[in-house]
Amino acid sequence: MNFERVVFGFFTILALTFNLVFVIGEIDNPSHHDVWILTIAILVNLIATGLKLGDRSQIGALLLAASLVADLLLISARIFWIVAESDSATGPTAESMATIVSLAAGALAANVVSAIILIGDALMSRR
Amino acid sequence: MVVLRHMRRPVFALIVVYAVGITGMALIPGTGVDGNPEKMSLFHAFYFFTYTATTTGFGEIPNAFSDEQRLWAIFCLYMGAIAWLYAIGSIIRLVQNPHFTTAVNEHSFARGVRRLTDPFVIICGFGDTGSLLARGLSDHSIRATVLDRDPERIKAFAVRDYRVRMLGLCAQPDVPRHLIDAGVRQPMCKAVVALTNEEDTNRQIAIVAKLLNPAVKVISRSTSERHCKHLSSLRDVQVVNPFAVFAELLDMAIVTPLQHNLNSWLVGVPGTRLGYPLTVPCGEWILCGYGRMGQELHRRLVCHGIHVVVIDPDVDECVAPGRVVRGFADHDTLREAGVEQAAGIVAGTDSDSDNLGILVCVQHLNTDAFTVVRQNRHENQLAFDAAKADLILQSSLTTARRILKTLISPLINELIDYLHGKDQPTKEIINRLQAAVGERTPHLFRIGITSEEALAVMEYLDTGMQLVLGDLFLDPGKLDEALPCVPLVIRRASGLVMLPGDTETVNRGDGILFCGTVGSERLLRATLNNPYTLHQLTTGVEEPRGYFFQWLDRKLSSRHGLS
């Protein structure tokens, strides 16, 4: 067992699961989606991205790219949330909620790609 | 443009007919919606004429016609329909014109060839040998452009299923224009292979190709001594004489059976098992057929002090030393030649039915004899397989294999030459190959230590460290085992290194020929480009990936250093 692999896999999969936790629920129902979960998801994603920096292999480059896509989409979703909240007193409307969750769902796709690459790499090395 | 030139008259006829019809329709008075006399507008006249001339016929539009108009409409219909038939007929005649089709095919072929960006080979002549060579190239994902003057062969070529796209044209391959169309001047053209049935055409192709592009490699098949000599005098032209190749193979089988077995296995003679060399007996031999191939074989056999009896209908006693039996090889002549006591029989006539007949005869008369048979036509393969000869020499297959190896791994011939007469190293390499590849089909591949093919290795060498060959092909999945592949030859600036050992250092610019499995090539190439796998294989330690883990690793090791 390799300590590095454990930490790396932990953060990659944690990023994926937090993303899923936020996305799950009705797409336009604000009570199904929590802003705290979104913020934590962004934080975990950023940590996972940081761990991927500096890897010189092909797979490392692909993992970093997928992670950057997820960051970009999640941060866009968070900014959208802030803008939507400032417009109304009661929080985001159903329409803006749908956009926010769509963006997060896009990030989820990127995180799934990350996880698949990680598993594929582990299986390829057969150790 | 040639289309427009041929279409000038029909187009002119159409324009005149349209003009007459439309003008007449626009001038003839008709009746409007309200019952007042009204002439048809020019646009409506054109609309009417268009659907009438093409025999579509929507009816009387926009209003019901007057009788005058109907009279003119009849005229328009016949005139327009005839003009259109004439025009369409002209187009069809043009399309069916063989010269026109040839011009279009040449044009699209040349355009396809110009767009090729991968290395390719020009094959001139798509007979048995050409098609076997194309198949072999396709198996190695190398493209080819094919020229043959027989349209049937090009049609057969077009329906073949290749792994990579191959381009074919029905054209005289020795015409310079066609060779240029096939891409002889393109930098990606690796070689021109002349395989037509005419010796003169092959020579012409070789000379023209050399003149058009002096850098291109030319390989030509030739069976006549005169042409062989002539071609060999050209620089960088390789001549493959199937009969000489046969004789060489038989020679090798007699003198160095181990090397012959290795060679057959590597160049993919079907049914060869590694490590089971033939044992060729040295008693009296019978040679049926004393043509070009028979003479080559006779010379080689006599060289080794083997007593040879020749059976041939028109051979001179004085030409062939040794005993000669005149006549076609059959039951009687074979017995006369002493088949019951013969150690080996060569059925080497240029007729497959004769050769098969000789084999059947021999199997009746002498079951122990070593049989060598010449197969002339590739399509008779199954019959020859069933005849169970000890050695089958097939002209097209041998030639195609020889050329393919020259194109793909020229080093393999050097290796076989190097092993000539060295039984101990041959046995060792055979053992290693058996352990690595076993019963699977051998896969030859070459890797270059360059930044395109082996980025991680180049980076590793840039740090000034030494890399040994043995580390390179360790299995990244198991670490203590090697991949199923064996390095055969290293080509470097200082010369060739035959059968390099595991401790041989790897340098920049080396080209290494491996023999292994397809899967081993994939894993090896992955190692060459992945710095982490390479580091782990050379040191056994997994290097931390990414800045954070590298920093953590340094922290931990310095703390260990302090305590």
Image (spheres, coloured by chain):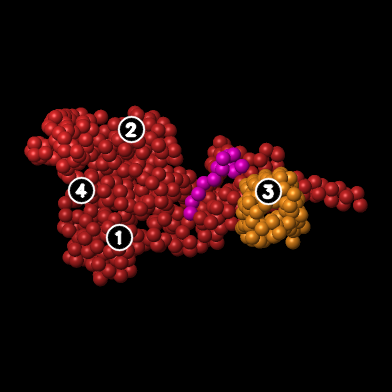
Q: Amino acid at mark 1?
A: Gln
Question: Which residue was labeled with disc 4?
Answer: B318
Q: Position of residue B428 (x, y in %)?
A: 55, 57
Q: Secondary structure at mark 3?
A: helix
Q: Position of residue B183 (x, y in %)?
A: 36, 35
Q: Earlier in the sequence, mark 1 or mark 2?
A: 2
Which chain corresponds to the colour orange? A
Foreground of the two, B213 or B296: B213
In the image: residue B496, left or right of residue A4:
left
Residue bounds of the magenta highlight: B443-455
Residue B297 lies in the magenta stretch: no
Q: Around disc 2, counting alpha carbons within 10 Å, would you say few (fewer than 14), some (14 to 19), or many (20 or more)?
A: some
Question: Which residue was labeled with disc 2?
Answer: B180
Q: Can residue B536 be seen?
A: yes
Closest to the camera, between mark 1 and mark 2, is 2
**Pointer 1 indicates a residue of which chain?**
B
Question: Which residue was labeled with disc 3?
Answer: A77
> What colour has chain B?
red
Q: Earlier in the sequence, mark 4 or mark 2?
A: 2
**Pointer 2 indicates a residue of which chain?**
B
Q: Earlier in the sequence, mark 4 or mark 1?
A: 4
Closest to the camera, between mark 3 and mark 1, is 3
Labels 4 and 1 share a subunit: yes
Q: Amino acid at mark 3?
A: Ala
Q: Residue shown at 33%/32% (left/top)? A: B180
